[in-house]
Amino acid sequence: MASSINIWSTPASAVSEQVSILSMEPTPTTGGQPRVTGRTRDAVLAVDRGILAFSRHWLLFFNLFIFVYVGVPFLAPALMRAGWTDGARLIYTVYGPLCHQLGYRSWYLFGEQAAYPRAEFQARTGIDPNDLWAARGFLGNAQMGFKVAFCQRDVAIYGAILLGGLLFGLPFVRRRLKPLHWVAWALLGLAPIGLDGFSQLFSNYPYNVLPVLNLLASRESTPLLRTLTGALFGLANVWLAYPYVEESMREVRQQLEDKLRRAAGAA
């Protein structure tokens, strides 16, 4: 049975030696903290390698995500034409909370026209454009074609983000492009889409039946304007954000490469 240490009758040097022995850590330390070893160390290094890989290829992951995000809505009309309506309706349902999907502001595939403006949409379908639920619930038919699950403006926004991401991947662009100033972003990207979108708001129910707002000119945008303003907004967002993301990812790469280099040397 180990005897206790009597600090009053034991020389100070002996007490110090015994206390030091009793308080020794069995695990080597680094910077005052226990060094991570074994499986825990392997797991930490695996996570670091995964983050490093993402920091090196973040643009590829971003572009792939946007490609799928904007591409799946085009799959819906293709499935409708092929008769796989359950799959198509699932896509319309999933994208429903992300877009208004109004039939007179959407693109159509496999039909007579690519788009059907407000008046023509009402004439062909018999649906009152003010009935927003009916207008968004119309998926198309064999004659008119079937609508894309994203509206015209959203297709332009995300399509332009994808295009901007591909252009940013060019080496000379990626090295030299500086972030767009926020004032330029507001003027080039936000203002056009804001004016075009807001000005047509009053053509919809309930604004178009309110006496006060009836004094305002009712306006409906066009597929061309929705596409142009949406594309400007998407490209401006890439120009504003991607250079900052690249700078942040470059710092992450440098830190993790140094960390993994030290870990390899200590192994």
Image: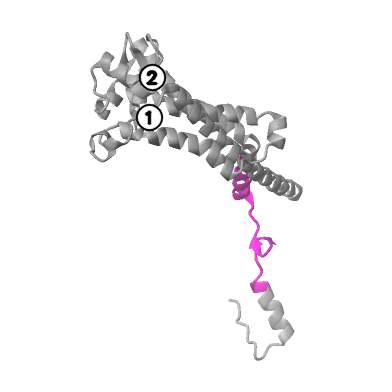
Residue drawn at x 69%, y 88% as measured from the top left: 10
> Is residue 96 or residue 26 the one in the foreground?
96
Q: Is residue 133 left or right of residue 18?
A: left
Residue at the outermost front position: 215
The reply, left or right, for residue 68 in relation to residue 16 is left
Q: Residue at x 23, y 38 (%)?
A: 210
- The reply to whether dot 2 and dot 1 touch (C-beta < 8 Å) is yes
Residue 73, image x, y percentages: 42, 23
For badge 2, the amino acid type reads Ala
Q: Is residue 45 magenta?
A: yes
The answer, for residue 64, to whether it is visible in the render is no
* Label disc, if present, on residue 95 of the rendered structure: 1
Amino acid at circle 1: Tyr
Residue 43 location (% of width, % of height): 59, 45
Specify the segment rendered in magenta.
21-50
Residue drawn at x 61%, y 80% is: 3
Q: For marks 2 and 1, give the CA distance.
A: 10 Å
> Which residue: 46% across, 22% down?
224
Residue 76, disc: 2
SS of the residue under disc 1: helix
- Toward the viewer: 15 or 191? 191
Q: Quadrant of residue 254?
A: top right
- Judge the density around disc 1: few (<14), some (14-19), many (≥20) Cα neighbours within 10 Å: some
Please tell me whether residue 130 is drawn above or below residue 38 in the rendered image.
above
Of residues 188 and 89, the one drawn nearer to the viewer in this rendering: 188
